[in-house]
Image (tube, rainbow, N blue to C red):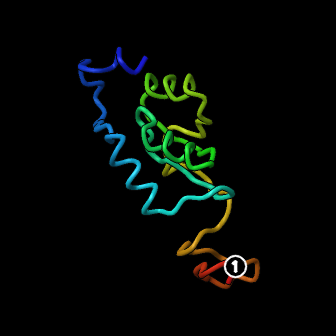
Amino acid sequence: MERAMIGRKNDGLDFFPTPKNVAQQMIDAAEIKEGMSVLEPSAGWGHIAEQVRDAGVDPDVVELSNDRKELLEAKGFRVVGRDFLELSPRGFTYGDVFRAKDGTIGVMRGSGG
């Protein structure tokens, strides 16, 4: 499926596939390890998601293009949406702003502070 997409006419969505060596450098820099939750918000052909999976994490992926979404599903990825801006987070991560039940606004710091 991926080969059939090479050189195909633009589908109206900007798409720039990440070279596999660059994807690996990103995973190394992010220090992704088993047990982490990872979202690939614009998965394209899945090059970054494949490197995440090779690091021992099954990532959630998002893709706007129907054809690329089908490719990602064929590769065994869990497609959780089409537009990452419309996703509800699974949990808080470092730097996320949140509102506590008592109305207090805070920013997640470290491992649960």
Mark 1, residue position: 112
Q: Position of residue 98 (x, y in %)?
A: 62, 74
Q: Position of residue 112 (x, y in %)?
A: 69, 79
The quadrant in which residue 75 appears is top right
Q: Who's the residue at 57% across and 43% down the image? A: 53
* Circle 1 residues within 10 Å: few <14, some 14–19, many ≥20: few
Q: Is residue 21 above or below residue 113?
A: above
Foreground residue among 42 and 102: 42
Q: Position of residue 68 (x, y in %)?
A: 44, 27
Q: Is residue 5 above or below residue 16?
A: above
- Looking at the rendered image, the quarter that the N terminus falls into is top left
**SS type, badge 1:** loop
Q: Is residue 81 above or below residue 1?
A: below
Say left or right for 83 vs 76: left
What residue type is disc 1 on? Gly
Q: Who's the residue at 46% across and 55% down the image? A: 27
Say left or right for 1 vs 112: left
Q: How many marks?
A: 1
Q: Who's the residue at 58% across and 36% down the image? A: 79
Q: Position of residue 43 (x, y in %)?
A: 45, 40
The quadrant in which residue 21 appears is top left
- Looking at the rendered image, the quarter that the C terminus falls into is bottom right
Q: Who's the residue at 55% across and 43% down the image? A: 54
Say left or right for 9 vs 75: left
